Image (cartoon, helix red, strand yellow):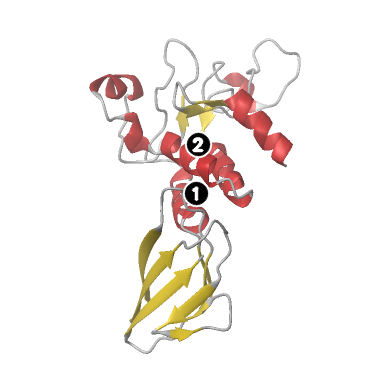
Amino acid sequence: VRTAMEAADQRLIHRDQSLIQLLDPPFDKSDLNPGYIKGYVPGVRENGGQYTHAAIWAAMAFCRLGDSGRAWELFKIINPVNHALLPEEVSKYKVEPYVASADVYAASPHIGRGGWTWYTGSAGWMYRLIVESLLGFKLEIDKLYITPCMPEEWKVFKLHYRFRSTIYNITVNRNSAAKDVTRITVDGTAQVNSYIQLTDDGKDHSVEVSI
């Protein structure tokens, strides 16, 4: 898996252009027939452009490998806001920077231009990337696991989660270079499990998670 992700980093992640290709080279001169994607212009959508679903899955994969640096780097590339910080970026991206774009062109002269917006399942995957993979928020019925993929510069972050009529105010502290949770307290009481046992009692609870 690590070898595959290193190859993806070298061949498909273009930091200078702020895009992550689905594949390269595109299917335009090959006798191989991958199906409908060959009908797209080379470098557009699934035929060698950025297909945002897969770009997000790449960031998730780096999280799974414990590579927080590249996971957050890819998220910054994918984040549409970062494609419209300067007037020249707006002119290149050409679509709304406040919604997910299904694809980004990798073909000259339109490199960096956003594709379909408002009509992509990648928006849901981006939400899961942020909440579940990067912040490590994983809910299993009434058990809440916090296993973040924190950037090196982060020492602490906070989450406020409403469980039905109950509020959990969660502070995650990094006290070492380790990536595993070492201690959880709820209202000052240390927990014996590696998760937060959620109870709907209508109160506010203070949670401390140490890594």
Q: Position of residue 79 (x, y in %)?
A: 39, 39
Q: Position of residue 21 (x, y in %)?
A: 56, 27
Of residues 40 and 132, the one drawn nearer to the viewer in this rendering: 132
Q: Is residue 131 left or right of residue 29?
A: left
Contact check, label 2 and label 1, Cβ < 8 Å: yes
Type of residue at label 2?
A: Thr
Q: Residue at x 47, y 31 (%)?
A: 103
Q: Residue at x 57, y 59 (%)?
A: 178
Please say whether residue 56 is visible from this viewpoint: no
Q: Position of residue 157 (x, y in %)?
A: 37, 60
Q: Residue at x 28, y 19 (%)?
A: 88
Q: Give the vertical position of 133 relative to 191 (above or below).
A: above
Q: Identify residue for label 1.
A: 125
Using a 10 Å C-alpha cutoff, classify the residue at mark 2 as few (fewer than 14 neighbours), some (14 to 19) or many (20 or more): many
Q: Is residue 184 left or right of residue 7?
A: left
Kindly report the distance in space between the C-alpha atoms of the residues bearing marks 2 and 1: 9 Å
Q: Identify residue for label 2.
A: 52
Q: Quadrant of residue 40?
A: top right
Of residues 114 and 196, the one drawn nearer to the viewer in this rendering: 196
Q: Secondary structure at mark 2?
A: helix
Looking at this rendering, what residue extends furthest in the bottom direction?
201
Looking at this rendering, what residue extends furthest in the left direction?
87
Q: Secondary structure at mark 1?
A: helix
Q: Give the vertical position of 23 relative to 79 (above or below).
A: above
Q: Residue at x 47, y 22 (%)?
A: 105
